[in-house]
Every structure is written in C-alpha cells, then in structure tokens.
Image (cartoon, rainbow, N blue to C red):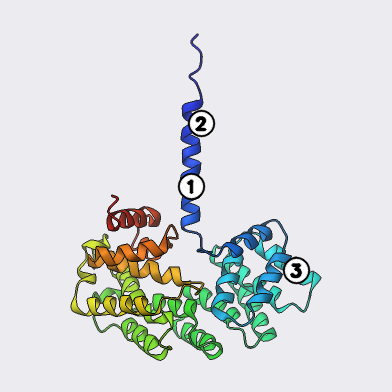
Amino acid sequence: MSPPPPRFGRSRRHVAAQALDAALGAALDSALDDCELVGVRAALAQGRWQAARSLLAHTRDDWDRRGHQVTVLAREPYCAAWARDWLLAEPDSADAAVLLALSLVQRALRGKEQPALAREVCRSAAASVPADPTPWLGLLMLEQAGGAGDEAVRLFDEVRARYADHHHAHHLMVARLAERHAEAGPDPLHEVYDFAQWAAEQAPADSPLAILPVVAHAERYRVLAAAGHEPPDPAASGHWTGGRARQVMKAAFDWWLEWEHEGHPRRLVDLNFLAHAKVCEGRGAEAAALFHRIGDHATEAPWSYPDRDPYSAFRAARDSALGTA
C-alpha cells in the first residue's frame, strides 16, 4: 500500500485560504479604519464591556461618530448579552441602553429577534437620552427592512431634529427613496435625486453630505439593475455617462479635493461611492487618487451592486485604476 501523499500542499492551500478570508474580512469591516473601535469590539466579544463604556463616554455628542461606533459594536453577535450585563451593573447608563437597543435592531435584521421588541427598547433608550439621535437611527434601520414609507420619513425627521447633518441617516433615506417606482425605469427627475441635492445644499459647505448626490445615483442604479432596466455590470451602463450624471460626479470630486475630511468616521463610505462612480464614468486617474486614500478599506456598498461579490469588484476596479491589473 502506497504511503499517503505529503500534507504540506494541502496545508499551504489552507493557509492561503485563511489569509484570503482574513483579508476579505478586514477589507469589508464595518469599523473601517477605526483601530480603537476594532479593539473595543474585540474586547466586547470577550465580555469586557468596560472598553465600550470608556469609548462611548469619550464620544459624547459627536453624533456621527457615536452612531458609527454604536452601530459597529451592535453587530457583534453577543453584544446584546454583554449590554444587558452592563445595564445590570449600571442601570442608569444611557450608553448601555443605546447599545442594547441597537444590538436588538441588528438581531432583528438578522431574524434573531422580534422587531417589536427592538422598537420598544429603542423608544425606551430614546426617552432616556432625548438629545441622542442614535436610538432613532436604530428605528430608521428597522423601517428600511420593510416598514411603511411615511414612518421612515417621520423617523428621519426625528434624527434630523437632533442632528441635521446625520450622515448614516441620510444614506439610509437615499437608499429607501431610490426604491420607489422601480417599475417605471430610468427617470432623471426621480425624487431621490431631488432629495440628495436638497440635503447637500442644506448642509454646511464642509459637510460630507456633498457626496450624497453620488450615493443617490448609485442607489438608483442598484434598483434599476435589479428590475432589469440596467445591465448587471455598472461600468457597462449608460447610467453613469449622461450629462447630469457627469455634473454630479464632477461636483462631488471637486468638493473632495477642497474639503477632504480625514477625521470623519464614515468618510471611507463616501470615498468608496465616489471611486465606484469614477470607475463607472471611465475616469481612471480620478478613481486612482481615491483608491490611494481608500487603501484596503472597501465597503460592501456600492461594490456589490446589483448582485456582485463586493471585494472582487473592488479589487478589480482598483487594480485597473492603479494600472496593476
């Protein structure tokens, strides 16, 4: 009987596969480039909620950052259990209440919790911290998953009443509005474009909401492609090459050149949308400048639109733009 083949080949393939999985996980990490947040999330996964306590205490009323941090921590599978432990130790902790609320929202979105309970806990957290838009952000996330359109608008207004330029909430509303009237096909006067332009104009000159019209364009492509009105390859779609589209892309890119915010917690979301748009528009040099800023921090949206592997699409677009394909 011949001896079994040596195992080093299989081991190397296994190591390579593990390395690829690790790279993919890091590239699509919702924490983006926030190393401190990554460390706090790891501590929370081990039941050490004190790190989350310290992080959120320092965030205070930086609402975009707080919303980003809480949302990322809430995605940790055992976050709800550790947030409940935190509340047992500190029953009056508003931060623990908000973290529990968002963790139940994430569980509800994964089908692991009843949406009614998540809504109840979000409303309780909102009552305990009236100035904080984060519990209302959680309620808006639940509505994005299939609630009534009018209710989503009302919840968005609740967020804006507390922080008018809330980045994540505006992105959620653009995604929701883009889904209206998909059956009608392309419409350059669709309401999502008006909303995005209005929000960009209402925001301060240095606000990253200036990128929102680009986000609206990508979200509308997602909806139209899913309905069969646009090709599944966004770069092959005329959606990105019309006069209006080019004007939107140029205005957003010019804003980035003048106002780039290296400290905004969700700036890489904007840069991914803008790079995707420049790739689809065929502006390789401008896309390359954005990819240099993005590094390996790909985001699932919009690279997954309409039904693609996001990391593969991101890597292919980046390699082409940087001349390394």
Mark count: 3
Name the amino acid type tagged 2.
Ser
Residue 226 visible in image: no
Name the amino acid type tagged 1.
Asp
- The residue positioned 35% from the left and 66% from the top of the image is 290
Which residue in the protein does label 1 denote?
21
Question: Taking 257 as reference, is 79 above or below it?
Answer: above
Which residue in the protein does label 2 denote?
11
Camera-side residue: 301 or 16?
16
Is label 3 in contact with label 1 (beta carbons under 8 Å)?
no
Quick one: label 3 or label 1, which is nearer the N terminus?
1
Name the amino acid type tagged 3.
Trp
Measuring from the top left, give residue 314's x and y in whole percent.
36, 57
Residue 191 visible in image: yes
On residue 86, the disc is: 3
- The residue positioned 32% from the left and 78% from the top of the image is 252
Q: Quadrant of residue 108?
A: bottom right
- Mark 1–mark 2 Cα distance, whole angstroms, equals 15 Å
**Residue found at the far front of this picture:** 258
Side (left or right) of 136 relative to 231: right
Question: Taking 236 as reference, is 199 above or below it?
Answer: below
Is label 1 in contact with label 2 (beta carbons under 8 Å)?
no
Measuring from the top left, give residue 212's x and y in whole percent.
37, 79
- Mark 3–mark 1 Cα distance, whole angstroms, equals 32 Å
**Residue found at the far top of this picture:** 1
Q: Secondary structure at mark 1?
A: helix
